[in-house]
Image (cartoon, rainbow, N blue to C red):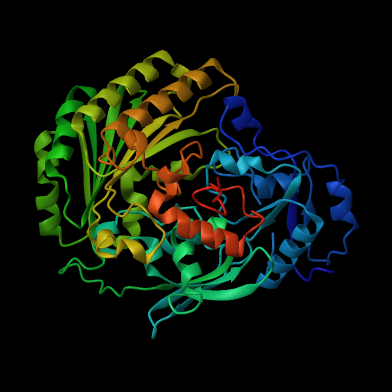
Amino acid sequence: MMLKTAAIVLTSCLLVPQLALGLATRQEPQTNYDLAGLVTSMRWSAQTTVSFPGQTRFVNVTQRWTTFCAHLGTSPLSAQETREISSKLGIPFLVTSGRHGFNPTLGGLRNGLAIDLSRFDKLQINARANTLTIGPAIRTSDLLRPLYNAGFIGITLGGGIGRWDGVYGLFTDALESVRFIAANGTALTASRTVNSELFWGIRGAGANLGVITEATYNLRRIARSEKTGSGYGLNADFTVPASQNATYFKLLEKISPYPARLAIVTVVVWNQTIGQTQIVSNWQYFGPRKEALVAIAPMIALGPSVSSIRYLPWPELFYAQQFGMDGANCAPGLVRNIYTASIRKITSSTWQSSFGKMARFFEGNPSARALTSFAHETYPNQATVAVPDDETAYPWRDAKGYLLFQFGWSGAINSPVAATAAALGRELRADYAATSGYEKELKGGLAAYVNYARGDEPLENIYRTDKLPRLAALKRTWDPNNVFAYHLALPTRYPAAP
C-alpha cells in the first residue's frame, strides 16, 4: 500500500529521563523485527516525512511538554492508512497532536511508530448552528491566544476542566460529534444519536478507544458588553507571604463552595528575591465588575503583599493570570516529575501542612527552587454537576479541586534531588487523598483526573469502579487487541475473569 499524505516518526527510545526517575512505564515484549528496514522499504509518497532518532527532524516532532516522547499526517485518510499498516505489520504506535500529556505510561512504547496529527489543523465556525469544528492539531492557543499549548481535542477526551466549569461545565459537555478511526481502521461518526455508546466512552476515556480526526463543539454566544459583564471578567493576582499561609488556606475553606463565576488557582513557589516560600494566588470572576469586586473582597481584606486587579475581555483573562507568567508552564522539553490528586472538599489543615513540607523541600534543595511548584486548581462545579453523571464516562463531576505537585531541577536527571522529589510527591498526594472527600468511596481517598493521572493509581481511582464494566465492553468492541495501550490502558473485561 502506498500512503497518500502522511508523515510518521519512528520512536525507539522514548522515556529515558522517566526511567531514570523510576517512574511507572508499561513493559512491552522485545521485538525481533528491523523496524527501520520495514519503514524505509515501504512506498511512501513525496510528501511523507520519515524521521529516525539522531536526526534534527526527529527531535523537532518528538519534543514534548515534559521530556517524554512525541509524534505527522495530513488527512484522515493518511492517518487511517498509516494505522492500518502499523497494525498489519504488528508495529506498536502512538498517535499524538499537542504532545502536552505527562503520563509516564506513554513511555511504554518501544521500537514503534509515532503518528503525529499536527497537520490536521481544520478550524471552522458555523455561526448559524453555533458550532465549532476542529482537527486534532488545534490547540487551545489557536482559540484563546498563544499561551495554551495543549491539544484541545486531547483535553476533551479526558473531560476538560477549567475556570468556566461553574458556568459552562466541562469541555466534553460541549462536544457534539467526532470523526473516529477504530483500531481495525474503520472510520465513522459518533454522537449522541449515532454510535451513542461509543460517544459516551469517548467523553472521558477516548484516548483508549481510537483516533479522533475531527471534533465538533457547541458554542455559547456572548454579547461583549462591559455593562452586563458578558464577555468580560476580573483577573486578580496576589502574593501571600509564608507568614500568612494558614490564614489564606482557612479563607479558601471558609468561602467554599465558590460562586459559579469565581475560580481560584493557588501556586506555592520559591521567591528567589526574598529567599522564602510564598503563595501566588489567582482569582478570576466571569461577570460584572461590581459583582467581581464583592467576590474578591475577602482576599483583599487579608492584606496580601502584592496585588494586581484588572477587568478584561475574556480571551485576555487566560494569559493575564499569575501576573502574566502562566505561559512559562507550557515551555516544552523540561524534566517534570508530577504527582496529582483531585478533591471535592478543602481541608485547610492539610493545605497548611503541605505548605510547610514544600518550604522545607525548597530550603534543602536549591537546584529545584526555580523549576518546582505546587498548584491548587479550585474551580466551581455548578454547571458540571448539572449534567447527569451517566451522560458521559467522565467520573469526577463533583470534584472541586485538582492538585499538581510539579518537581523539576537543574543538573543531571539522576540527581539526588530526584529521589527526594519523588518521595515528597507521593507523600503529598497521599496527604490530600486522605482528606479529599472521596475517602469512603475510594481506597486511600485518591481520585485521579484522567488528564492528570500519573498511571500508578488503580484503574478504579482513575475511571471509577461503576463505570469500568461499560468502558471495558467498549474496549472489547473497538480495540480488543489493545492497540491504544499507552495512556492509562483500559481492560477488555472488568472485573477480570477469574
User: Which residue in the rendered view is the most extreme toward the top?
Assistant: 364
Residue 255 higher or lower than 163, as above or below: above
Does 5 sit left or right of 317 as displayed? right
Q: Quadrant of the C terminus?
A: top right
> Which of 340 and 262 lies nearest the eye of the viewer?
340
Q: Residue at x 44, y 58 (%)?
A: 204
- Direction bottom: furthest residue: 128
Q: Is residue 210 visible?
A: no
Total marks placed? 0
Is residue 189 depicted above or below 474 in this figure? Answer: below
Q: Residue at x 80, y 68 (%)?
A: 3
Task: Report the side of 205 relative to 262 (left or right).
Answer: right
**Quick check: 358 left or right of 189?**
left
Identified at 85% across, 48% down, the residue is 36
User: Considering depth in this image, is 470 or 342 the residue closer to the camera?
Assistant: 470
Q: Nearer the viewer, residue 323 or 295?
A: 295
Quarter occupied by residue 227: bottom left
Name which residue lies at 32% across and 20% down: 357
Q: Where the N terminus falls, by quadrant?
A: bottom right
Q: Is residue 360 above or below residue 166?
A: above
- Residue 202, how many percent across, how many down? 49, 63
Q: Is residue 466 visible?
A: yes
Judge by depth and name the residue closer to the eye, 187 or 246.
187
Which percent across, then down, holds residue 163?
Answer: 30, 54
Q: Where on the picture, by quarter, is residue 17?
A: top right
The spot of residue 99 in percent (x, y) is 57, 50
Q: Position of residue 176 (x, y in %)?
A: 43, 74
